[in-house]
Image (cartoon, coloured by chain):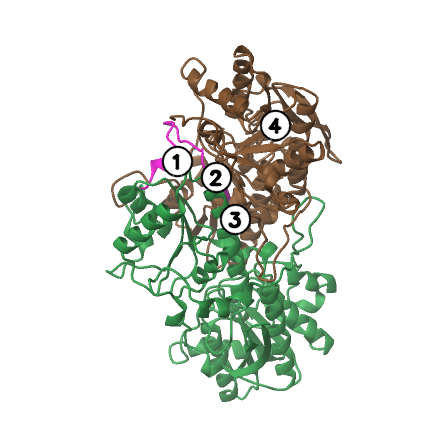
Chain colours: A green, B brown
């Protein structure tokens, strides 16, 4: 690589293992004698010149990132506009890089981040400042193309499958006189990856979950109710997994199609209560519903070991690529075997990844639309394998680290965002 | 004890560790050469003569109950009426006991179960059939009197504290540009024990949770909003824990005071979305909300070791009391030391427990009404200590047992319930 420092930034929604990628970056860079700065609150910190000197952080704290959920340096939802629309932001980034001798920018995020990194690399060249940009994959949505999976997804998948299995054991115990329909809503606005992963909770006929509603399918109340009724009559209860992104035939999110709050606004999120209302109204069954929300993507206590290893590996590889002088690439996960699951990391060009979205293949959803196929299982199963619990204190709580995040003194004027 | 068999029944809402009590009962009885029958679906199975012969179950399966959530024999929500109102049901129980030579009835449940066991014991005597009744404590609500805590509670408490800590790490990472208020709704219709346990997630000033809403307090929108606003301004975000039982000044559950579903009915459960609507309307902050519902009480994967040990111990002791010929008692947990936490099991008379409810002491809630006190911490802290993860399969999922539950041939005529 060009001499100089690495700037690492976390982008978009965080996950249970994004900090493991940070640990992979920092530990590998330290081994090579490279200093890593981190941007405070993602790309905003880079624009604001709010930088953190990770070399001031104790080794044990960096190691503890491997078992700490959330984003240790802060992340943000802030999408840089196009070069044409807001060239000033890109120029500012280069200005900050220059001021702090940053020669590699590692952007840990999803599609948008890959796009941004790609653009930053180009404008650097245009402005005569050499900076290599490398994307580090992260998204619980599992919607990055090229890579076999996205770090963060496997852990949500595991959390969801376990939660569905556990809650269903509760429901089946009580179904004779209590809840007959249990509905759990999971994340996934555009693609049903997490909902599909819930399907791993059961494998034998009659096992929960019995109904999975994918955003890939238009919601049909009649077939849904018929399936729920048939399941309750056959199995005694019915566990439903619904993706937050499920829409009705008008293209309206289920979550927004139903309830009005006390102020007359559409109910704030919640496809599950809408389905529960439908079940009560049309079938009369007792129901319960759950909406784990952030719990699912921050549940480091039950993270997938496979996911954790991959999150660390992409961080580590990103630094190795940087050291080799690679530019505009992303370390992606390549599956070489399903069973046993084997994978390796390869460099893929960012412009093959940016602005694409990986949908679930059609053959992952069963014919009736309510379950997953053998092909889906083959793909999903390895991603939740292995446990990697955090250390626990004598108080019974996981020991998560909070970094001291020492600020790098500013050298530039304030930039208006 | 009188010769004869033990009948064990699970009652009411199940928990992550009620099966550990079952294991304590069955393993201890086996050691003593006593046969344990279990009632299918709780007291209903006893009335219907739907009995399970646990001696047909492999030793390893019984041991596996210690790490399996839900109710392995089925439970039910069915409260026996008073002796005066429905003497026939009590007489039927005695008839079933007689037919199967059951001389001890172990009823694993909360307040109602303690009351039922008490009554059954008395009518047996009146009808000239000697049967000893022993209550085995269980309730995630933690509302049984006399006992230090109730098996089931410690595990929900641990799940809740960990979830609040994890989700708050997510929120704090993103607060600059995303969610500022995160609301999690927990169980507890009458008492705020679980909500209070969430308070264990933080201890330093500024730690989440910042606001706890207890059912013990009338909800005041103004003070709530003021507290949320002040917290966001000071800490940057605000994590709110709300008990499902919180009511407004009209005595209406928050969960029912807000949204209307598509059919015009009151929104089905959910104090959290009502609060979220309020926050949006009055403060304009971005929010997220979670409602883990059954996930919290079935989360065996993150059960408290203390809770698990106590659940097993009360099952074991119940059989020892039975062997000693004790009647109308419950093995309760007696705390002998806070730090280190020490406890023992003692026999307490059922009529001191039945029909009482343990509320949170007033001095457990902080003066402003939104937090827990040092006294609460002292009481709650030990209950979530220790981990006892279930075994995991190579598929990355916990290995939970499903018993074969061999039926005992019926000897009596059908009984109409």
Magenta residue span: B239-260
| Disc 1 versus disc 4: nearer the observer | 4
Query: How far is the residue under mark 2 from the one under mark 1?
Result: 10 Å
Report the residue at 35% width, 62% height from top: A215
| Disc 2 versus disc 4: nearer the observer | 4
- Residue A66 place in picture, x, y as percent: 65, 63
Of residues B167 and B264, the one drawn nearer to the viewer in this rendering: B264
> Picture quarter containing residue B344?
top right
Label pair 2/1, CB-CB below 8 angstroms? yes
When the figure is inspected, residue A273 is found, relative to residue B117, above or below; the finding is below
In the rendering, which numbered label is found on residue B242? 2
Task: Tell if the residue under mark 3 belongs to the same chain as the one under mark 2.
Answer: no
Label pair 2/4, CB-CB below 8 angstroms? no
The mark nearer the N terminus, 2 or 1, is 2
In the rendering, which numbered label is found on residue B5? 4
> Picture quarter containing residue A304?
bottom right
Question: Which chain is mark 4 on?
Answer: B
Task: Tell if the residue under mark 1 belongs to the same chain as the one under mark 4.
Answer: yes
In the rendering, which numbered label is found on residue A166? 3
Query: How far is the residue under mark 3 from the one under mark 1?
Result: 28 Å
Residue with the mark numbered 1: B254
Task: Tell if the residue under mark 3 belongs to the same chain as the one under mark 1.
Answer: no
The mark nearer the N terminus, 2 or 4, is 4
Specify whether residue B202 is in view. no
Report the residue at 44% width, 56% height from top: A205
| Residue found farthest to the top | B126
């Amino acid at each position: 690589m060009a001499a100089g420092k690495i700037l690492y930034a976390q982008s978009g929604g965080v996950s249970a293992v994004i900090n493991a990628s940070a640990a992979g970056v920092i530990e590998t860079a330290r081994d090579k004698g490279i200093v890593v700065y981190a941007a405070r609150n993602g790309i905003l910190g880079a624009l604001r010149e709010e930088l953190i000197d990770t070399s001031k952080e104790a080794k044990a704290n960096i190691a503890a990132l491997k078992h700490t959920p959330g984003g240790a340096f802060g992340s943000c939802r802030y999408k840089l506009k196009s070069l044409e629309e807001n060239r000033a932001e890109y120029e500012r980034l280069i200005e900050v890089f220059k001021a702090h001798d940053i020669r590699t920018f590692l952007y840990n995020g999803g599609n948008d981040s890959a796009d941004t990194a790609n653009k930053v690399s180009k404008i650097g060249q245009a402005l005569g400042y050499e900076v290599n940009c490398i994307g580090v994959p992260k998204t619980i949505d599992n919607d990055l193309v090229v890579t076999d999976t996205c770090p963060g997804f496997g852990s949500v998948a595991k959390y969801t499958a376990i939660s569905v299995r556990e809650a269903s054991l509760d429901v089946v115990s009580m179904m004779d006189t209590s809840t007959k329909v249990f509905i759990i809503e999971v994340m996934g606005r555009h693609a049903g990856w997490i909902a599909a992963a819930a399907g791993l909770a059961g494998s034998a006929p009659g096992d929960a979950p019995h109904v999975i509603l994918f955003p890939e399918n238009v919601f049909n109340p009649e077939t849904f109710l018929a399936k729920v009724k048939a399941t309750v009559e056959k199995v005694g209860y019915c566990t439903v997994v619904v993706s937050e992104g499920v829409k009705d035939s008008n293209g309206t999110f289920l979550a927004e199609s139903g309830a009005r709050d006390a102020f007359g606004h559409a109910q704030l999120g919640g496809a599950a209560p809408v389905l529960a209302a439908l079940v009560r109204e049309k079938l009369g069954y007792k129901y319960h519903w759950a909406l784990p929300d952030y719990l699912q993507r921050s549940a480091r206590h039950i993270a997938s070991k496979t996911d954790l290893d991959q999150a660390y590996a992409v961080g580590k590889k990103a630094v190795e690529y940087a050291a080799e002088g690679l530019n505009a690439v992303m370390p992606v996960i390549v599956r070489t075997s399903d069973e046993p699951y084997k994978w390796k990391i390869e460099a893929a060009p960012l412009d093959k990844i940016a602005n694409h979205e990986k949908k679930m293949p059609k053959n992952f959803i069963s014919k009736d639309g309510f379950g997953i196929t053998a092909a889906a299982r083959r793909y999903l199963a390895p991603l939740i394998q292995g446990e990697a619990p955090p250390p626990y204190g004598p108080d019974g709580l996981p020991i998560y680290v909070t970094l001291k995040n020492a600020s790098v003194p500013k050298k530039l004027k304030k930039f208006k965002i």
